[in-house]
Amino acid sequence: MALGYYDRVKPAIRETLEREEITRSVLETVGQKHQVCPFELSLDVSVWADAIICDYNYVFDPRVYLRRHFPEDGGAYGFLVDEAHNLVDRAREMFSADLDAREILDVKRAIKQAAPRCSKALAQLHTALRTLGNNVTEPHNEPFAASDPSVELNLFPAKTAMIRNEEAGVSTSPEFPDNLIEPLEAALEAAESWLVKNQPAGFREALLALYFKLHSFRRTAELYDEHFVTLIENSPDVKVRLFCLDPSWLLRKALARGMAAIFFSATLTPMDYYRTLLGGAPEDPVLQLASPFPPENLAVLIQDRIQTHFKGRAESLGDVVEAIGTLVQGRRGNYLVYFPSYQYLNDTLQAFQARFPLIPVLVQRPGMTEPEREAFLAAFSVEHRETLAGFAVLGGIFGEGIDLVGERLIGAVIVGVGLPQLCVERNLIRDYFQQQNAAGFDYAYTFPGMNRVLQAIGRVIRSETDRGVVLLIDARFNEPRYRRLFPRWWEFVRVRHSAALSDAVGGFWHQ
């Protein structure tokens, strides 16, 4: 449908613009009728639209933003950024890039006979990556902390500290590895020279995908500065990642393409954190509104005597199961129970089913297809009139962005404070912001974790007539670090044992 597109597109554009609202179904229908690519049609008609609803990347991603809308000096646009709390991590991902030696080697072997020049260029790039990996994984006498600047390797400029994280097998540096530039450019040129011929081949899609990755890596290299860090992994194959620690300045550059922007979300807490990372300035106006729903319609219960941190989970598993069972037995209906990881979810699920075998359970699984997601949500109906407990992960597809209004969801349990999984990248974010504002742990872990918690709680009350209960399980919810992030309108109650929890749940529903 792309072949001969411009020969057939004018009547397709005219027909599309007769509609007041140009939706996916409209584009598909017109595209089929006129045999034109519906995606390309959507781009062409967008220049006549008063409002465009799109994913973040069409505005912010340096690789794919809609250049037809954004001249160098900007345009007369206002950006309305919904669910803005998600943009921080999305921006980090958009501004980061990866190279995988294994993928390069596989493509190089596949094209060796048909495209020898391109194969040779990829071989040289693969060698440069292997050299990089070998140099940074030389054994050291001692492991180095993430803030230790004492090790210098000759692969990087003398001023650069290459930090070895022994446990994770990852080395980090604040400098871009310049020895990759020349073979990267050569590989890009050779790949483009072959792809532009548009010859059919079994390896074409793999080469095309690699070409875009190489192009993305080069573009990110052009943006690389003190807001980035280089991660090099050498187990079992070399992987190089240019990771954006602080996306704020690149978001600020993207926002300059328009005249104004409004970021909004129900969970921009704390405001200073989001204003900083979303490219805002202290003088930017801020509007914080209380919940539009009656606070007495939501019972927030906190069981703060149960330890759910990683080392304490096995010991407290029985208490967690008992608390979940007590809540969902308080009134017949639908509940969602959220966990910080699939492993914790599965461990608790097994114990819960042994303790409460008569309570039906639905479980979120990794990599669910769209029909599986729809079936999961469809089960939360009001017709079955029985208790149903859905087990899901915080920050996942059922942790935000779903609307189960009224009796479709009457309660939620949040197990843990939602901290992201410990990893090298999160620790690098922590160290970076610790130097910037002495709030490294909060920026890397606390604030993103509590945002997941607040988003999950937001699934319970979706209208002015909804009523529901929320149970927070974790001793850390009693700490000031987390209490100060609670919404001001919450009227929470501490319940320190099952009897108190049962009384609180029964009292709320009795009202």
Image (spheres, rainbow, N blue to C red):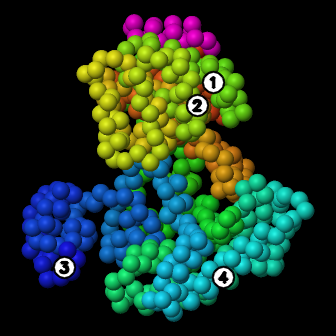
Give the residue type that dot 3 points to: Tyr
Q: Position of residue 314 (x, y in %)?
A: 68, 27
Magenta residues span 496-511
Give the mark, 1 or 4, whose residue is nearer the N terminus. Answer: 4
Question: How busy is the neighbourhood of tag 3: few (under 14 within 10 Å), some, or many (20 plus)?
Answer: some
- The answer to whether residue 301 shows anywhere in this view is no
* The quadrant where residue 174 appears: bottom right
Give the mark, 4 or 3, whose residue is nearer the N terminus. Answer: 3
Dividing the image into 4 quarters, which one contains the C terminus? top left
Q: Which residue is drawn at 72% across and 56% down?
A: 168
Per the image, is 503 magenta?
A: yes
Label for residue 317? Answer: 1
Question: How busy is the neighbourhood of tag 1: few (under 14 within 10 Å), some, or many (20 plus)?
Answer: some
* The quadrant where residue 26 appears: bottom left
250 horizontally vs 23: left or right: right
Give the mark, 3 or 2, whose residue is nearer the N terminus. Answer: 3
- Nearer the observer, 222 or 338: 338
Q: Residue at x 29, y 27 (%)?
A: 381
Q: For the residues carrying marks 1 and 2, which lies nearer the camera in this image? A: 2
- Nearer the observer, 476 or 328: 328
Q: For the residues carrying marks 3 and 1, which lies nearer the camera in this image? A: 1
Dividing the image into 4 quarters, which one contains the N terminus? bottom left
- Residue receiving disc 2: 347
Q: Where is residue 498 in the image (x, y as percent from the top left)?
A: 58, 11
Give the residue type that dot 1 points to: Leu
In three-dimensional space, the C-alpha distance between marks 1 and 2, rounded to whole angstroms, equals: 8 Å
Give the mark, 3 or 1, whose residue is nearer the N terminus. Answer: 3
- Residue receiving disc 4: 127
Question: How busy is the neighbourhood of tag 2: few (under 14 within 10 Å), some, or many (20 plus)?
Answer: few
